[in-house]
Each structure stands twice: as structure tokens, then as C-alpha cells.
């Protein structure tokens, strides 16, 4: 199993190009199931979740040609409507095939994703929404089996804001009969990116970017060309790396307005940020100041940035309080960080981080995707060597992270 070896204590300087967003690319690839025409997708990141998704879609008969960051999909020969456990267990986003398959073919069988490291993560809201649209759903032997001759438009109010839930229902509604209203919809930029693609495919959607999406179903969708938005979480991860390790780096091909709250927190920490068109320069010459925050849905502070900001807070001046409100078990990096000499105490869903003068490298274990990224940041700061095990979590969601960091002066290498 691959590991990352980091020699900490080096400032970062240079340029990093941000990849396309994992969490936009995954639903967008599933949208390929909605049409028999070709879908030309650009800026698709090269990461394991994308490979897994393409494998899953290929098994269903969706044709895919991948050339660098371009993927051309064609859904004119789909013959299998099942997402097996073997694939769903490695990538929860597989649930995103449910809505499109059901809407276009009237049937889908998708393994229940089950719990994962960061929380139990049920999909009851996806099911509730599809049932409201007339689907008959049974859950048996670990599979969601959904059938509907033709989905019918409905008003769906989800109990909570759910990102993939909104995306699944949105895709289903594009081919349903009549009008669907999704209240309490997620407003994450990745949902907006998917909605924009769907519109390019001929879907009729109003309220894009708001918490009320109104969809008029159409008989069929056609092909389109679309470029996946830059990854705001990858951008934020590198911003935190520079904030913690110090340096002067320009991040290119990004969209800073998707990171407003996180940028405010970095400024509060003393980071100098200057933006221009689609790039942002991050400069940090001093010890960061501790910053407190609580995670919430977009446009609030993203849960997917919680661990990386915590890594910066470890060596900050002062004490910070970090409250996680989205997932019930997203503090697994805390124990590993404490092994590096951090001083973190957790009380329920709040972590209290007392900034320390230094961290000291040690072997640590990655437990989930963003926890892995936070350990990389901590390793860049720690004195001596940090060895990070189980980086398959990191590879799920980052496109060549160690190459990008090496290019700006980090001493980081992959050990096979
Ligand atoms: C592939 C993808 O886009 N993943 C993102 C997506 O995950 P994902 O879409 O799985 O997360 P949700 O927005 O659905 O989850 C939000 C909260 O709602 C709960 N919930 C959700 C659905 C449901 O049917 N029932 C239910 O109880 C979840 O357990 C969680 O506590 O949004 C999360 C929150 O921004 C991010 O951390 C993930 O990176
Ligand atoms: C939690 C994440 O992803 P997923 O929903 O795919 O597990 C993430 O991207 O941080």
C-alpha cells in the first residue's frame, strides 16, 4: 500500500494549477446516463473516484473515451441498471446513478452505500424524493431497487440539505413528467455546475444556485459540451498548506468566489491573499493566528475544509474552537495530529485546539479523504519525517497532490 514520506519545515513557493472538482465531476459523469447523445466533458480531474465512476458506468454500457482531462461519454447502449456493492462501497457517490437510471430506463438497482468513516450517511432523502415522484422502492439484501414506468413531477422538501440528494433528484426530475420543485435544495457550487450542464443538455431548470429548484420535465436530453468547475476544496487545501508552512504561491485555474468564508478565515489568520481573474496568490510570512469556525452548508464554512484548517490551527498563535455540524464522526484526524505533538481536546462535536510552537514528525494513519490532506499539511510543518499510511483515501480525491506540492518546494515522496 502506498505511503507518503514528508520532510517538514520547507516553505512553499511557486505555482500550482488547480484541477477540476471531484464533487462536480462525479454527478456530471452520471448525467451521461440521461442521454443517448455524446457528452464532451473538459477539466475532468485524474483521480481514483473518477476512475471508479467510469468503471461503474462502463459496466452499465455507457461508452467513455478518456484523453487527459477530457472525457467523451455516450449513453446509446446502456443495458445494465445495477450498481453493485463492490463498487459502491469504495465510492459513496455511486448512489448518483440512481436518479438518472430510474428517470430514463424506469428501473435501477443500487447497493446501499452503508456507513463510512465520517458518519452513518443515510440516503433516506434520495429515496423519499424519488418515492414522491412515483417510484416504487424496495430495500432488500442491501440493495435499493427502484421502479417507475414514468416518474412524475412532485414537490419535494428534504428533511435536511443534502448535496448528492439534491443532485440525484435534480437529474431524475429532468426527465419526469411535469413540474418538480425541490425545496431546501443544496446550493453548493457543484450542484450548480451539474444544473448548468443539464440545461446545456436541454433540461428546463429555474432557480439554479438557490435553495428552490423548479424543473419542468422534458421528453429527452441531448448532447452537450461542458467544462467541470475548478475544485474549491483542492484550492482551499493548498491555501491552508501555505498558511501553515509559510511561503508565496499562486494557485491558477480556480474560482475564488466559491470559497468566500474560507478566504475570510485565512485573512483572519494573517494570510495575505490577492486574486486576479482565475488565480489567487497566497503569501504567509508569520505564524498564523488561531481561527474558530463551525461547518455548515454552502455558502457557509465547508465541512470538506474542516480538517485542513485544523492543521493550520495546530501551530497557530492562540486557541481555536472548531465545530463540525454536518457529519457526526469527522474528527478522526485529531488523534493522529496529537501524535505529531498537537494539543487538541474534543468535546462532542467541538474540537478545542491550543496552538503549539512546533510539531514533530511521526508515522500517522490517514482515515478519510480530507483527514489525509490535513495530515499532509501537518507533515509539511512538522520537524523531521512524517510517514502517512493508507493514502488511498487521498488518491480518491486529489489529482497528483504530491507532485503539485513537490513543484513548490515541499519535500514529499510516494513510497510504494
Ligand atoms: C460526492 C460529494 O459530493 N460528496 C460531498 C457531499 O456528500 P453527501 O451528498 O453524501 O452529503 P449530504 O449533503 O447528503 O449530507 C449532509 C448531511 O445530511 C445527512 N443525510 C444526507 C442524505 C440523506 O438522505 N439523509 C441524511 O441524513 C448526512 O448524513 C449528513 O449528515 O456533500 C458533503 C457535505 O457538503 C461533502 O462533505 C461531500 O464531500
Ligand atoms: C467526503 C467527501 O467525499 P465523499 O462524499 O465522496 O465521501 C469529500 O470529498 O470530502
Image: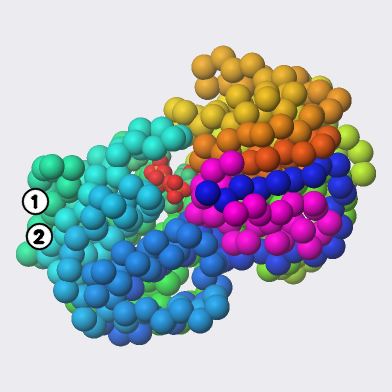
Q: Is mark 2 on a helix, strand or loop?
A: loop
Q: Tell me: is circle 2 under 8 Å from ligand 1.
A: no
Q: Is 54 placed above or below 286 here? A: below
Query: Camera-side residue: 161 or 1?
Result: 1
How far across and how far down the image is residue 10, in percent?
A: 86, 47
How far across and how far down the image is residue 189, in percent?
A: 52, 57
How far across and how far down the image is residue 333, in percent?
A: 59, 31
**Residue 331 visible, this orientation:** yes
Q: What element carries label 1?
A: strand
Is mark 2 in CB contact (under 8 Å) with mark 1?
yes
What span is colored magenta in the figure?
A: 389-416
**Residue ID for mark 2:** 148
In this rendering, position of residue 158 left or right of residue 403 = left
In this rendering, position of residue 187 left or right of residue 112 = right
The image quadrant where one finds the C terminus is bottom right
Residue 136, disc: 1
Amino acid at each position: 500500500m502506498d505511503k507518503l514520506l514528508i520532510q517538514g519545515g520547507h516553505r512553499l513557493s511557486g505555482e500550482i494549477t488547480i484541477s477540476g472538482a471531484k464533487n462536480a465531476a462525479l454527478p456530471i459523469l452520471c448525467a451521461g446516463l440521461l442521454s443517448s447523445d455524446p457528452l464532451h466533458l473538459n477539466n475532468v480531474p485524474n483521480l481514483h473516484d473518477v476512475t471508479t465512476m467510469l468503471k461503474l458506468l462502463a459496466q452499465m454500457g455507457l461508452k467513455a473515451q478518456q484523453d487527459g482531462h477530457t472525457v467523451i461519454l455516450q449513453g446509446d447502449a446502456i443495458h445494465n441498471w445495477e450498481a453493485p456493492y463492490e463498487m459502491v462501497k469504495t465510492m459513496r457517490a455511486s448512489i448518483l446513478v440512481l436518479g438518472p437510471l430510474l428517470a430514463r430506463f424506469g428501473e435501477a438497482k443500487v447497493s446501499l452505500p452503508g456507513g463510512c468513516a465520517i458518519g452513518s450517511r443515510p440516503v433516506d432523502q434520495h429515496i423519499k424524493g424519488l418515492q414522491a415522484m412515483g417510484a416504487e422502492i424496495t430495500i432488500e439484501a442491501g440493495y435499493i431497487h427502484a421502479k417507475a414506468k414514468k416518474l412524475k413531477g412532485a414537490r419535494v422538501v428534504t428533511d435536511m440539505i443534502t448535496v448528492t440528494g439534491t443532485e440525484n433528484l435534480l437529474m431524475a426530475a429532468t426527465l419526469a413528467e411535469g413540474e418538480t420543485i425541490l425545496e431546501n435544495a443544496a446550493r453548493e457550487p457543484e450542484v450548480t455546475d451539474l444544473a448548468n450542464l443539464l440545461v446545456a443538455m436541454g433540461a428546463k431548470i429555474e432557480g439554479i444556485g438557490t435553495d428552490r429548484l423548479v424543473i419542468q420535465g422534458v421528453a429527452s436530453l441531448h448532447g452537450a459540451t461542458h467544462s467541470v468547475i475548478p475544485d474549491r476544496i483542492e484550492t482551499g487545501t493548498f491555501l491552508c498548506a501555505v498558511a501553515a508552512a509559510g511561503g508565496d504561491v499562486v494557485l491558477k485555474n480556480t474560482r475564488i468566489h466559491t470559497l468566500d468564508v474560507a478566504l475570510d478565515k485565512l485573512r483572519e489568520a494573517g494570510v495575505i491573499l490577492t486574486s486576479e481573474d482565475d488565480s489567487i496568490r497566497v503569501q504567509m510570512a508569520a505564524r498564523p493566528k488561531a481561527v474558530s469556525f463551525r461547518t455548515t452548508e454552502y455558502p457557509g464554512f465547508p465541512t470538506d475544509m474542516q480538517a485542513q484548517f485544523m492543521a493550520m490551527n495546530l501551530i497557530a498563535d492562540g486557541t481555536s474552537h472548531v465545530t463540525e455540524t454536518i457529519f457526526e464522526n469527522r474528527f478522526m484526524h485529531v488523534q493522529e495530529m496529537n501524535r505529531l505533538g498537537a494539543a487538541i481536546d474534543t468535546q462532542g462535536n467541538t474540537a478545542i485546539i491550543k496552538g503549539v510552537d512546533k510539531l514533530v514528525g511521526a508515522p500517522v494513519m490517514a482515515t478519510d479523504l480530507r483527514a489525509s490532506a490535513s495530515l499532509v499539511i501537518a507533515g509539511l510543518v512538522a520537524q523531521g519525517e512524517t510517514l502517512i499510511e493508507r493514502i488511498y483515501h487521498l488518491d480518491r480525491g486529489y489529482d497528483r497532490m504530491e507532485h503539485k506540492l513537490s513543484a513548490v518546494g515541499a519535500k514529499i515522496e510516494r513510497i510504494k
